[in-house]
Image (cartoon, coloured by chain):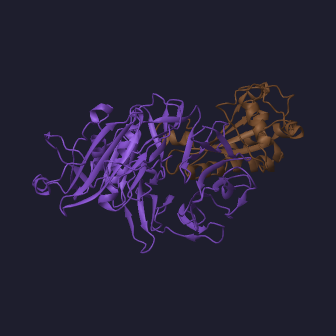
Chain colours: A brown, B purple
Amino acid sequence: MRSIVIATVCAAGLLIGAACSTTPEDQSAAKVEDKSTGAKPGADTRGVQPPKVAAVDLTKKPGVVDSMLKDPNSPLSKRSIFYDLDQFDVKDEYRSLVEAHAKYLRENPNARMMIQGNTDERGSREYNVGLGQRRSDGVRKMLILLGARENQIESVSLGEEKPQSDGHDETAWSKNRRSDILYSGEY
Amino acid sequence: MAVCHKKSGGLPGLRVLLGAFFLVAASSAAAQLSIEITGAGAQRSPIAIVPFNGEAAVGTALSQIVRADLERSGLFRGLEVPPLSPAPTENTPVNYGEWRSRLADALVLGSVSANPDGRFEVRFRVYDIVKQAPLGAIAYVFTKDNARAAAHRVADFVYERITGEKGVFSTQIAYIVHRGSSYELQIADADGERAQYLLRSNEPIISPVWSPEGKRIAYVSFESKKPVVYVHHLEDRKRQVVASFKGSNSAPAWSPDGKTIAVVLSVDGGSQIFLLNSDGSGARRRISNSASIDTEPRFSSDGKWIYFTSDRGGSPQVYRMASSGGEPQRVTFEGSYNVSPRPSPDGRVLAYVTRNAGKFQVALLDLSNRQVQVITDSDRDESPSFAPNGRMILLATVIGGRGVLSAVSSDGRIKQRLPFAGGDVREPAWGPFIE
């Protein structure tokens, strides 16, 4: 039942960020999310097991992101890693970027990160979801090797669905083959 | 679909079916698809569909919809019928010689009458003019709002009586419309009319698939900034999260009994295929086991196999494995990019997308003799989807920089384009037969 509550809480706009990223590992219970009638504000949690809900961190203020992460003079403001065609490994030129984020995660154990992998538009949408996942998984593994904790990072894929550039040539495609780093409060 | 059988007085042996056609979701002002036929088979059988006596009272020209449906199949050519006096009905005796001299191979005569309860009844007979034999008669009761659906039922009946195959004119299609920052999951009749949206979002929606009974659609929504698989119930518009594990959740596919959904999850690392109960109960069962990308699962219609895309051999190719899991067998060998496998309803053929000199086109693989045939001439094809009778394949392609839907007959001879006003249309899914 956890995901009911999480989904409803997010939909009700009470929390963004960390709460929404708390995806249950085990979904054995039935999960019903009814957005057409789910307008009850505040997530009616009666009848739902409270201990599970307590996993949501209510102390985390919504939308508040460490200003350091946005400071253009900080390497932490650099959030995108770009790839060559059919490549999935982080190129050397992005190594210092990944190291800076790994250091931040080490020093801020409560920080949570989502890495979104992306591809260019060519080919199957679902296969591209797989290729984007391979990119974000690569960044995630590198961060963990550099000392970040598993539970701080969720790597996902947006496939070809969220291009940075709408063009249909290599200039556009090279901007779209990327991994984007987001911190809780930003997604 | 509630169907009501009733004895008919005027037309012995005629079954009367009540079309209680569901309105699936709130109507929207969605722009409609309209279909152009861009190519047709050489042999199109001439058919005369005489305007149904009394159909003007409905406000919808049923006979014209029947004609358009039959022509869209690529198998028929509607004949122009001059006004006949007196206007014939299903009970008018047929002068076969006269219709033969008009070059008709087949003839449909019918009438529409208003029932006391405000509904209408269409009654019609189909004739084989060449063999000089009646092919059957039926009647449908319908409300004014459902006149188009009733006409599609008429077309299905005519099609089945003449070809011996079930028609797909009463089926529905689902697809995604992308305009600016808006994404809509829409459903429409197979002719593109009566479009309505099921879901509107500011984030992408991909991979809609109909459940076997046609009452649910599974899809992937990115509304939580990552791919999550939902099942949408058409009748009550309820949505259910079926896969929202850590990481990505995508590529849903229904088992033929509708109880199981195959999905692709990254929760264990990589992209691997799992089975879930479609009602959200129970635990996930992993059925693929590779260090590669295994995705785009599709069950064969007998439920024995799961076809899928995998790059375990270095390039993406189609494989299949037993639907309970097990050692995969490679299915496609020609070319370096073969994705999006779709087994045909009869299990004999596999449609997929192949890349050939930079063009992405739909190919058919005959699973018995391994022959491959590319059946489209466009170059950015995606997401093929078989009609439930296997005759046509709906697909997404790009024409003039815009995403459009296109349909091609499974022999490649008939091609249709479904232009759409405003926005990119993509990710088509042809729904099942409606019982």
- Specify the farthest residue to the right: A51
Q: Would residue A150 appear left or right of B210 to someone viewing this image? A: right
Q: Nearer the viewer, residue B304 or B207?
A: B304
Examine the rendering and report whether any part of residue B116 can be seen.
yes
Q: Position of residue B172 (x, y in %)?
A: 45, 45
Q: Height in image: A61 above or below B156? A: above
Q: Residue at x 34, y 48 (%)?
A: B9
The residue lying furthest to the bottom in this view is: B369
Answer above or below: position of B293 versus A139: below
Tell which of B40 and A127 is nearer to you.
B40
Residue A160, image quadrant: top right
In the displayed structure, would residue A55 be above or below residue B334?
A: above
Q: Position of residue A57 (x, y in %)?
A: 85, 33
Side of B317 relative to B59 (left or right): right
Q: Position of residue B386 (x, y in %)?
A: 44, 55
- In this rendering, the answer to whether B272 lies above or below A37 is below
Q: Quadrant of residue B293?
A: bottom right
Residue shown at 45% from the left, 68% from the top:
B348
**Residue B149 can be seen in this image:** no
